[in-house]
Amino acid sequence: MGDLIRVVVLGTGQMGSGIARLILRKPALQLVGACARRRERDGIDLGLAIGLDRALGIPVKTDLVALIDQTQPHVAIQATCSTLDDAWQELSLLIERGINVISIAEEMAYPAAKSPSRAAALHQLAVNHGASVLGTGINPGFVLDLLIILLTGVCAEVEAITARRINDLSPYGPTVLASQGVGLTPEAFARGLQNGSVVGHIGFEQSLRMIAAALGWDLDRIEQTREPIVSKVRRETPFVTVEPGQIAGCLHAATAYRQGRTVIRLIHPQQIHPHLEGVETGDSIDIKGSPYLHIQGRPEIPGGQATEALAVNMIPRVVGAVPGLYCMADLPVPAAMPGNANFSRFARQAKGGWR
Amino acid sequence: MGDLIRVVVLGTGQMGSGIARLILRKPALQLVGACARRRERDGIDLGLAIGLDRALGIPVKTDLVALIDQTQPHVAIQATCSTLDDAWQELSLLIERGINVISIAEEMAYPAAKSPSRAAALHQLAVNHGASVLGTGINPGFVLDLLIILLTGVCAEVEAITARRINDLSPYGPTVLASQGVGLTPEAFARGLQNGSVVGHIGFEQSLRMIAAALGWDLDRIEQTREPIVSKVRRETPFVTVEPGQIAGCLHAATAYRQGRTVIRLIHPQQIHPHLEGVETGDSIDIKGSPYLHIQGRPEIPGGQATEALAVNMIPRVVGAVPGLYCMADLPVPAAMPGNANFSRFARQAKGGWR
C-alpha cells in the first residue's frame, strides 16, 4: 500500500464532504485525514462528518499543523473558502511543509487575476518547498476557461469568444441562493448589489485572465454586469419560494476588451427552475476564428459533482508535476480516476514529468 | 530575435504546406527550412512549394541530415506519412540530434497502440537525447480521444463512452476519396476492404488505447467494422461522381470491450456531401457515468485546418516539456498561438516545466 497517494481534505462542508467520499471510492488514494474550520467538529469521526453511515476511525481535526505532522499527506484538497485572502493562511502553511495543494477556492483558479504579486509569491513558495499547487473547479476552472482554451487549439486564429453557462440553482442551499438574490424583491436585489450581499458568480476575472494568458492577449479592461432575473411565475425549492415579480436569480455577464474590441464575452445566468419559463439549461461555446466553432452540452455539466470530481481527478497530475503554481491550462487534462484496482498507474511519480 | 522558436517542416504536401503557411503567420516562430520526400522538389523555393505567391529565399531540401545541420531547429513537424513504420526513420534521425518532434502521422498519436515496444524505444531515445516527441491531429489526437478524456475529468465514475464524428469528405482529393472507397460499386468496395485498398479511418486503435490508458482501463479487445455508405442520390465533387447505388463513403466504427462489456464506441462515417441525404455533420460525445454528459458541435471541426493548427499550437507545449514521448493527454492543452507580437510568452523555455 506504500504506493497510495495520501490525501487530506480541508473543509467538511458540502464540497469537502463530497470530495472526501469520492476519495474513499478511489483505490489509488488513501484518505488520511480532514481538517474542519468549525471548532465544534473537532474529534468527530470523519465518516459521520461527511455523511457516511459508518465511522472511519479518523477523527476530524481543527489544528491543521498537527494534522499534517501526524498524517504526512502527499496532497491536500482545500474546500474551505472562495477568496485568495481567505485561502492564504492554509495554503502557505501547507506549501511551507512541502504538501501539494489542490484548491477549489474560486479565486485560486487563476490567482494572478486578483493579485499578480501574490500569485508570484505562491509560485516562489511552491518552488522553494517542492510543492505543486493548483486551483480547479467547474467554473472557474473548466467550462468557461479550460474548455475554451482547448478548443482554440484547433484554430489558426481567434477573433472573439462567446460562452454561456445556463444552470439551475434549485439543488443549492440558502447561502448560494442568497448570494444570487433568489427570493428578493427587485428593490432588495438592487440594494444587495450595492452592499455586496448579492455577488453573482465568483470567477469571471479568473476565467478571462486565464484565457487571455493562454492566447497571449493583453486585455484593455474587463466589465461585468449583474441583472436581476425577475420571475413571471411561482418557483419553489426546499429553501426558497419566489412569487411572480420576485427575483429567481442573477444574470451575471463579463466582457473582456482588447485593442478596443470585445474579444471575450462570458454569460452566466443562475436561477432556480429555469425550465418553468422555458429556459433550457446548458453550456455553450462559440469561437469566431478560423475555423468558427460551436460546441454545446445540454443540460449543463452539474457544478457541484463536477467540482468534486475535478479536485480528485487532478490529484495524479498535481502530484506528478514539477513544483510550482499551476492553473488548469498549465497541466495535462484531467481524466476520471479508475474506481478499480489499477493502482500502479496512479502511484506517486517522481517530480519532473508525467512518465 | 534570438527568442524565436526555430521550426522545420517535413513534408510539402497539402498538410505540410498548410502548416508551413501557418508558421509564417506566428511571430513567435521562425520557419527555417523544409524537407520534401519527393526528389523533384529539391532546391525549389519554399514559398512557391507551399503555394505562396512569393519566394522565401529558403530552398526545399531532400536531405534531412543536411537540413538539420544547417538550420539547427528547435522543433520539427513531421507531415509526411501515416504509419509508425513509415515515420520511424525520420523520427529517429531527428530525435538522435536532440530535435523536438511533432508528428501528424496518425499512428504517432498513440504509438503504443501499434507497438508498445517501439513506443518505449521512442521514449527512451527521446530521453537519452533530450528531445520531446508528440503525435497530434484532429483525429486521432483531439475529437475522439483528448476531448473525451478531458470530459471524463468532471466525472466521479465512467461506465461507457460513445462518440461520433460525422464529416464531409467533399473537400478532399483523390487519395483520401479512394481510401474510403468513394465512387466504387458495392462489389468493388467489398474487394477493396479485402485487399486493403479501402481502409476507412486510420486512428481508432490509437484513440481507444489513449482513452483506456488515461482512464486506467485494461481492454479485453477492440473490434472494428467498415460498412459501405451506398448513395441513394447522385453526389459529385471535382474528383469523383457517385451515381445512385454507388459508394459515397465508409461507415467505420470501433468498439472497445472491458470485462466483457462494451465500454467505448467510436463511430466515424466519412462520405461526400452527406447533406444530400439529410445527414447533418458534427462531432458528439456521450459519457454514461456520474454525471451523464452529452456534448456536441455542428458542423464538425474541419479536419485539415484543425490538424494544421494543432501541430503549430502544440509547439510551445512540446518545446517546454521535459524530454520524452507524449500523447495529447500527457501535455497541457493547446491554445491558439497569437498572431501578434506577444513573442516573449512563447519564447523557448528551459526544459522542466511550463513556467
Image (tube, coloured by chain):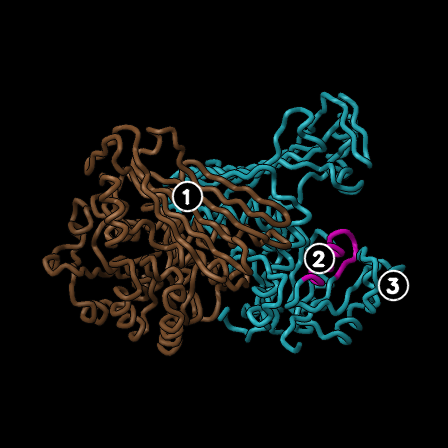
Chain colours: A brown, B cyan
In this view, which residue lies farthest toward the left? A40
> Element type at marker 1?
strand
Residue lying at 57% horizontally and 72% vertically, measured from the top left: B344
Residues shaded magenta: B10-25
Q: Amino acid at mark 3?
A: Ile
Q: Which mark is residue A165?
A: 1
Q: CA distance from mark 3 to mark 2?
A: 18 Å
Q: Say which chain tag 1 marks.
A: A
Labels 1 and 2 within one chain? no
Could you tell whether B325 is left or right of A310 in the image? right
Q: Quadrant of residue A230?
A: top left
Which chain does the residue under circle 2 lie in? B
**Visible in this render: residue A147?**
yes
Chain letter, disc 3 residue:
B
Whole-angstrom CA distance, mark 1 to mark 3, is 51 Å
State left or right for residue A127 relative to residue B191: left
- Binning the other alpha carbons within 10 Å of mark 2 as few (below 14), some (14 to 19) or many (20 upward) gives many
Does mark 3 fall on the same chain as mark 1? no
* Residue B20 covered by magenta stretch: yes
Disc 1: CA contacts within 10 A as few (<14), some (14-19) or many (>=20): many
The circle drawn on residue B44 is: 3
Residue B138 percent across, percent down from the top left: 62, 48
Q: Which residue is mark 2?
A: B19
The amino acid type of the residue labelled 2 equals Ile
Between disc 1 and disc 2, the foreground one is 1
User: Which amino acid type is marked by label 1?
Assistant: Arg
